[in-house]
Amino acid sequence: MRPIAFALTLLVLTAGCETSTDPFLFGIGGSGGGAITQAQATGDWSFTVTQSNGTACSTGALADGSVLTAHLDVGTDGTVNSSTSSWRSPSGIVFPLAGAVGLSDGHTDLHLSGGSGSGTGMELIGTTSATSTFTGTLSDPDPGLFPMFGSGVCQYTTAGAKA
C-alpha cells in the first residue's frame, strides 16, 4: 500500500508543477512569465531602450529612452510571420522582423533585421506577458551580424508595451 501512496503523491506533485505559471518552482529559475495567447502577442508594440553596458556602447548607438516600434503578427504556434511583421527605427525607417513568442510561457526571441543583404540586425530577448508588457534585453548586433547602430556591441535593457 505504501508504494501506491508514494506513487500517487508524486503524481499529484508533478501535475501541480506542470500546470503552475510560477517560473521559479523549488528555487529553480524559469524562462518565461506565464501563458500568453496569440491575440495578446499580436499587434503594435513599443520598446523603450536603456544602455546597460555604460560607456562600452560606441558613438551612434541608440540613446537612452529611444523607442523602437514593431508590428507583430504571431501565428497559432507562436512563430512571428516575417512577411507581415516589421519594426520601425527611431528615424522612421521600417525593417523586417522575425522570431517567436512562446505562447506557453511568454518567452520572446525577436530578430530585428536591417533589411535584405545588409548583414545588420539586433536581437530582442525577454518575456511578453498577458498584461501587454514586455521586459528583456536588446543586443546590437544580433550574434553573427553587424551592428544596426554604432560600430560596436551594445546591450540595452528594454521595456515594452502593446499599443
Image: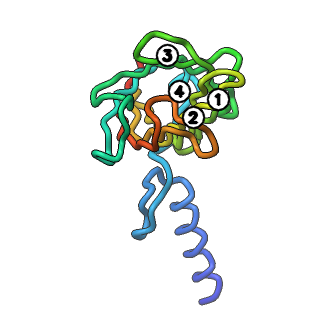
Q: CA distance from mark 4 to mark 2?
A: 12 Å
Q: Quadrant of residue 117?
A: top right
Judging by the rendered image, the residue that carries numbered circle 4 is 41
Give me the C-alpha separation between circle 4 and circle 3: 18 Å
Query: Looking at the image, which is closer to me, 31 or 142?
Result: 142
Quadrant of residue 25 within the rendered picture: bottom left
Residue 83, label in figure: none
- 15 left or right, relative to 64: right
Q: Amino acid at mark 1?
A: Ala
- The residue pinned by badge 3 equals 88
Q: Earlier in the sequence, mark 4 or mark 2?
A: 4
Percent position (x, y) of residue 112?
A: 57, 29
At label 4, counting other C-alpha atoms closer than 10 Å, the crowd grade (few under 14, some 14-19, many 20 or more) is: many
Amino acid carrying label 3: it is Arg
Q: Mark 1 near mark 2, Cβ–Cβ under 8 Å?
A: yes
Residue 98: numbered disc: 1
Nearest to N terminus: mark 1 or mark 2: 1
Work out how far the residue at label 1 is from the one at label 3, CA to CA, in angstroms: 13 Å
Q: Is residue 107 above or below residue 77?
A: below
| Quarter that holds the C terminus | top left
